[in-house]
Image (cartoon, rainbow, N blue to C red):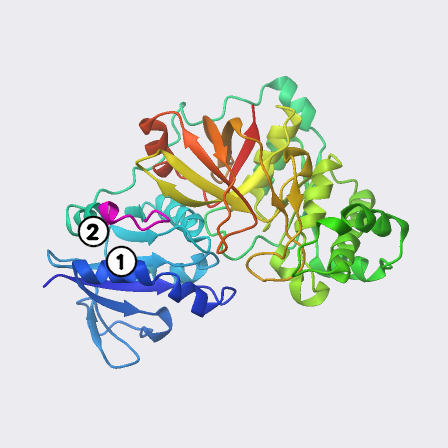
Amino acid sequence: MKKINLIVFSSALHDNASVMNSREPLFQALRDMAELNIIYPSTLATRMHGSNGVFSCGDRLQIEFANTEDSRTVCFIATGGTEEMFRQYLDILPRPVILLSDGLHNSLAASFEISTYLDHNHIECCLLNAPLDYNPNYFKTLEQKIFGEIPPIQSDDLSSKNRSPYFDRADRRVLSRKKIGLFGNASSWLISSAVDREYMEKEYDVKFIDIQLDELIDEYKLVAPDEKPVKQVCMKMENLVTEDRDAEELNKAARLYVAFRNLCGRYQLSALTVKCFGILDECRTTACLALALLNDDGIVAGCEGDIPALWTMMYAKEILGKQAFMANPSSSNRAELTIDFAHCTIPLGMVHGYRLPSHFESSTGIGIAGSMPSGRYRIIKFSGNKLDRFYSVEGNVLMNTNVPQRCRTQLRFKFDSEADYNGFFTTSKGNHIILIAL
């Protein structure tokens, strides 16, 4: 009988019961095609027994990880925030690495970050994504892909086709002397998003300014709940807060916005990104609302400390004159050539309506559930250590979705062709894309 060793990577930030219960249809479909052995990284031994690829688990079960004709090792990236965890176990995985994702809990976005990391390190991998409805027809194809000849993702090279031709002399003058605030380091899961800051500063005459999260937290604590700009935000938005939030949560989010504004003025920042999960414990709120309002103020603001995403947002604003939605790929549907995107913050100028629920992963603070207009949009993303790879494709936003196990602003994007759809999955770009309206 065929066997699948399914290594489940899940972040502690996500509710484990929800993560696992919502995947039972997926697990059952895998059981229908093979003997399923579900493995958690915490049970894996820290050293190899011999050199035959056999590892010992916490329950003393001996597991053969090598891919054979009837046995496959599949890494199920169950949630976002698992990228660094995956990297710790990379050495025990057979090649090509098989990554499986679905449409819940930022699974697909994390898989893109991991596949990009593997590409940058010249490790072949195969990225498989189950559609949100777990369509039975898909699982017939999935079984063939898992147990057939594994087609690796094609590496994204640095040919002239992939180099960005978009920064001419005039563009560089627009960017010249921009100060970019980095509040904390990049989030630990951004394993493929390191940037050569020294090169970027010299090449584009910009300045990266490191600002400790402690300084932001201290500034936040100095902002009084009844300060005029705080009250103005709260009065404007008090009727948009959902039932699970209250006036105090909105007030804290507004205070964080004012703290950011104060520091932007102090450091003369044109753009910023923040390691947003690093402020949750101290501030008891999230940066989602603050970043949305900063973008509306003309200060390009991104989250998770993601410099490539922020650079792409700066390009959108300064060169294209567009506001930008920094989003996670959430699920895909090959038959319909669609992919869903989601994130908990978006410039309010890009939506025609919004509500203010909690932030998805932490269930705290204030997130933004925005309604995006349908129509023509463009996906763009700079990537690579020198941000000299550029991805761009156009399509249509068809609708807004409402999936509980996702970030709050959600939309469905349709590619113009099958080639464009396939290209999205075979181009290394990390776990965030930037969407702009045309």
Magenta residues (range)? 130-139
> Which residue is painted at 76% across and 37% down in the image?
297
Does the segment drawn in magenta span residue 135? yes
Query: Does residue 209 appear in this view?
Result: no
Does the segment drawn in magenta span residue 58? no
Residue 212 lies left or right of residue 156; in this view the side is right
As displayed, is residue 121 above or below residue 323? below
> Which residue is painted at 42% across and 63% down in the image?
19
Query: Does residue 315 appear in this view?
Result: yes
Q: Secondary structure of the magenta portion, mostly?
A: loop
- Displayed quadrant of residue 317: top right
- How many labels, in total? 2
Q: Nearer the viewer, residue 315 or 10?
A: 10
Amino acid found under the numbered disc labelled 1:
Val
Query: At numbered mark 1, what does the secondary structure look like: helix, strand or loop?
Result: strand
**Residue with the mark numbered 1:** 74
Any mark on residue 146, and which?
2
Give the x, y percent position of residue 398. 47, 32
Query: At numbered mark 2, what does the secondary structure look like: helix, strand or loop?
Result: helix
Tag 1 and tag 2, C-beta contact below 8 Å: yes
Any mark on residue 17, and which?
none
Which quadrant holds the N terminus?
bottom left
Measure the C-alpha gap from mark 1 to mark 2: 8 Å
